[in-house]
DNA sequence: GGATTTTCATGCGTATTGCTCATAAATAAT
DNA sequence: ATTATTTATGAGCAATACGCATGAAAATCC
């Protein structure tokens, strides 16, 4: 026999209002339906909870005992489920995102601004990691999801590509290459290069592609972060191999970007999360914001730097 | 939309067992039905509570938050309703009965004995009252129900007659009347009588009947309780007018009962309770025991004393 | 490595449940 | 006595929930 939760709810209303008719109104059902619910509940427990004449209604002794518990049950249910519902609609809660440092200071601020506007009460924590450490943070559950450079496929993670970002050569206006429309990797022979090294995902990508093509441009200067690479290029120490997404920064500092071709090497920025695990509402909301914003921006950026 | 309590219950089971199939077994439904319940619940709250692959099932972050509350709700419901159900079957609880002193020491002990056997944990409190005070105790809610002498009908109370009990004359073996098969009220002239007085319902009954018939036997001795009346009769101070139900006691003390006729005056012992109010399970059980036992005994008693 | 097993999901027909409408029954008010 | 108010009941109908058969995906077995 099925649990007559409707009956319990009906019972509470009738007990509080002292009338079937009024309780029925509150529940938006007919008096008939209400009577039936009470009858089902009473049949279930096997005793009368409400003493009702054709004229009035009162609690029976047993009903009086039961009322507090009944009230608690109904409140728990209604409020508990309601909290879930609104949290699902509003995306309430805390989020932790593991991300590449470069994304954290280039693309994320905008996304976080629009997220903060939508969910003023939510907190966001960024874990800035490089290379494979993003993936690890996600896999180990330190972060709800991550933003990293796509590399090998993972069996226990799901990825969604946000943008494909070609590598370009960045150099000062006075650099010999600055005048070229494009430059091939093979044309980098003899040029002083600034490259990203260490745990950087960028390095891994570039090297993987180039070794396949048996091309070996040699970096004279290896730095650990994009800002440092840009600083070196600005001082004309060398030309830097960087993702095109950095354009805004490079242009702002008076540097020139030259597309690198043969082959065009891309890094793919992707959202990564644990497979078969649902995101919390808050995480889901942020995930969606980032995806929407960066898909738009990413496409535009890569188009901008790929077409000329 | 309706509250998916089944879904909540299903959710708890799946969360605890980690498997739809096993949870379905526990709930005695098919796996199909269980899946549907979870789906309904998730649709209701608008988010996934269980992350399930075709191979395994785990809680989602939100589900993990919800589980404790869900568990409490289900437990409250199941246990709460179960307690009511069993209390309805077993009649658990305390009872207070307002009763005439005479019934309290003549008929009730037997009834209470059999009640105590059936419901070892229940407590029973007796309020020994005389006459109209029983009725009052019931009306005011001091007692769950009462046993009193039926008199006037009451609008707010319900009565059920247990036995009709004729009045008899009780006297010692050596008393002149002891040899008679029966005696009329009019034949009591000149005999010293012991009568019940005070607030006693018996007195009210006897006087009401006799004044209608314009008969006026005059009591020389008026006592307040049956035991006293019997004691006086035993010492041959006079003949006592008492209900026939006292027979066992009178016979045991070596007294003679002579039926009083023209008219035969009865007192009716009745169960009395508030109209339109259900008894608690415990009270209901005791009520039933008393009714059954005294109906049997009462009928026998009144037959025994009415037919010869 | 392909077959098998295990586990959750889905389409569809059916049975049950629960609701509404109309109306009855009982009681209080006029 | 009549009317009005309040709960209960009967019948029909619509929505809901269930079960069966089957599908899809993944782990396990041989």
Image (spheres, coloured by chain):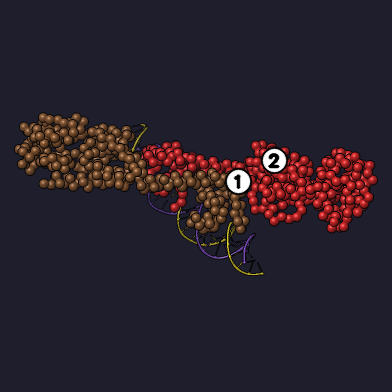
Chain colours: A brown, B red, C purple, D yellow
Q: Is A184 on the left or on the right of B174, as rendered?
A: left
- Seen at 67% across and 42% down, the residue is B95
- Report the side of A174 relative to A89 (left or right): left
The quadrant in which residue B98 appears is: top right
Label 1: few (<14), some or many (≥20) within 10 Å?
Answer: many
Q: Nearer the viewer, residue A295 or B6?
A: A295
Q: Are marks 1 and 2 on the same chain?
A: no
Name the residue that disc number 2 marks: B125
- Front residue of this view, candidates A258 and D29: A258
Q: Where is residue B184 in the image (x, y as percent from the top left)?
A: 90, 52
Whole-percent x and y of residue A108? 24, 41
Q: Which chain carries label 2?
A: B
| Chain designation of label 1 | A
**SS assignment at label 2:** strand
> What residue would you read off at disc 1?
A62
Residue A191 seen by the camera:
yes
């Amino acid at each position: 026999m099925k649990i007559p939760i409707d009956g319990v709810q009906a019972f509470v209303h009738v007990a509080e209002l002292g009338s079937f008719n009024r309780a029925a109104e509150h529940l938006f059902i007919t008096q008939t339906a209400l009577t039936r619910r009470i009858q089902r509940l009473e049949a279930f427990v096997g005793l009368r909870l409400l003493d009702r004449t054709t004229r009035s209604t009162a609690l029976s002794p047993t009903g009086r005992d039961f009322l507090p518990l009944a009230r608690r049950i109904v409140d728990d249910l209604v409020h508990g489920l309601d909290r879930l519902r609104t949290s699902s609609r509003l995306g309430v809660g805390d989020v932790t995102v593991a991300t590449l440092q470069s994304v954290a200071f280039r693309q994320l601020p905008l996304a976080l601004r629009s997220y903060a506007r939508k969910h003023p009460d939510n907190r966001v924590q960024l874990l800035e990691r490089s290379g494979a450490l993003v993936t690890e943070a996600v896999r180990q559950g330190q972060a709800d999801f991550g933003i990293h450079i796509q590399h090998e496929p993972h069996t226990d993670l799901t990825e969604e590509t946000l943008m494909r970002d070609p590598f370009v050569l960045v150099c000062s206006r006075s650099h010999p290459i600055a005048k070229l429309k494009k430059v091939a990797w093979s044309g980098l022979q003899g040029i002083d290069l600034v490259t990203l090294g260490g745990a950087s995902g960028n390095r891994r990508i570039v090297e993987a592609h180039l070794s396949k093509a048996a091309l070996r441009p040699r970096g004279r200067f290896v730095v650990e972060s994009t800002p440092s690479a840009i600083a070196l290029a600005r001082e004309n120490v060398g030309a830097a191999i960087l993702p095109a997404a950095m354009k805004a920064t490079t242009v702002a500092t008076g540097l020139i970007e030259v597309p690198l071709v043969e082959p065009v090497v891309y890094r793919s920025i992707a959202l990564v999360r644990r497979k078969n695990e649902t995101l919390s509402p808050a995480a889901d909301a942020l995930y969606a914001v980032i995806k929407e914003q960066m898909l738009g921006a990413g496409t535009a950026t890569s188009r901008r730097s790929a077409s000329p």
